Image (cartoon, helix red, strand yellow):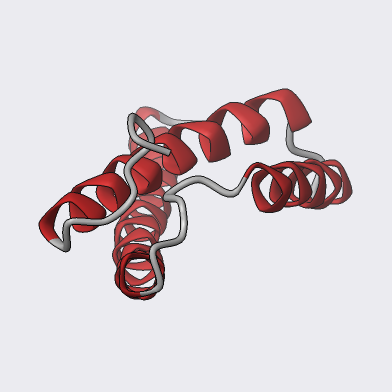
Amino acid sequence: MTDASVKEQLSGYRQSIDNIDAALVHMLAERFRCTKAVGVLKAKYDLPPADPAREEYQIARLRHLAQDAHLDPDFAEKFLNFIITEVIRHHEAIAAEHGGVTEKTA
């Protein structure tokens, strides 16, 4: 391949990566809109911010999806754990705003 064709191919890959990154950001934003609604509902009914059974189910589910997609399940679990930690932090803040249960008081 010539230098120009290599640069063109590299540019095409990078454009795809940029598009995927943008989609990931928009998907995460939508996910956090949904989890915020969950946090408000939990605060309203004085439910704890964390749900270990749900988290365990989601991790197992995501690991299976990752394996099917030929993605490292350990990486997928780390990614989901990062998101879960942030969601719980948001839920604790929402609960505190509503005077409800937080992880520290649960």
User: Is residue 46 positioned above or below 88 on the image?
Assistant: below
List the single residue furthest toward the left.
97
Q: Give the residue drawn at x 65%, y 45%.
A: 55
Q: Is residue 78 among what the camera can see?
A: yes
Q: Quadrant of the C terminus?
A: top left
Camera-side residue: 69 or 86?
86
**Image x and y of residue 77, in percent:** 66, 32
**Image x and y of residue 61, in percent:** 80, 52
Q: Is residue 34 left or right of residue 77?
A: left
Q: Give the residue drawn at x 32%, y 65%.
A: 43
User: Is residue 32 positioned above or below 69 on the image?
Assistant: below
Q: Give the residue drawn at x 39%, y 57%.
A: 24
Q: Give the residue drawn at x 76%, y 32%.
A: 73
**Image x and y of residue 81, in percent:** 54, 33
User: Is residue 60 positioned above or below 72 on the image?
Assistant: below
Camera-side residue: 22 or 36?
36
Camera-side residue: 53 or 16?
53
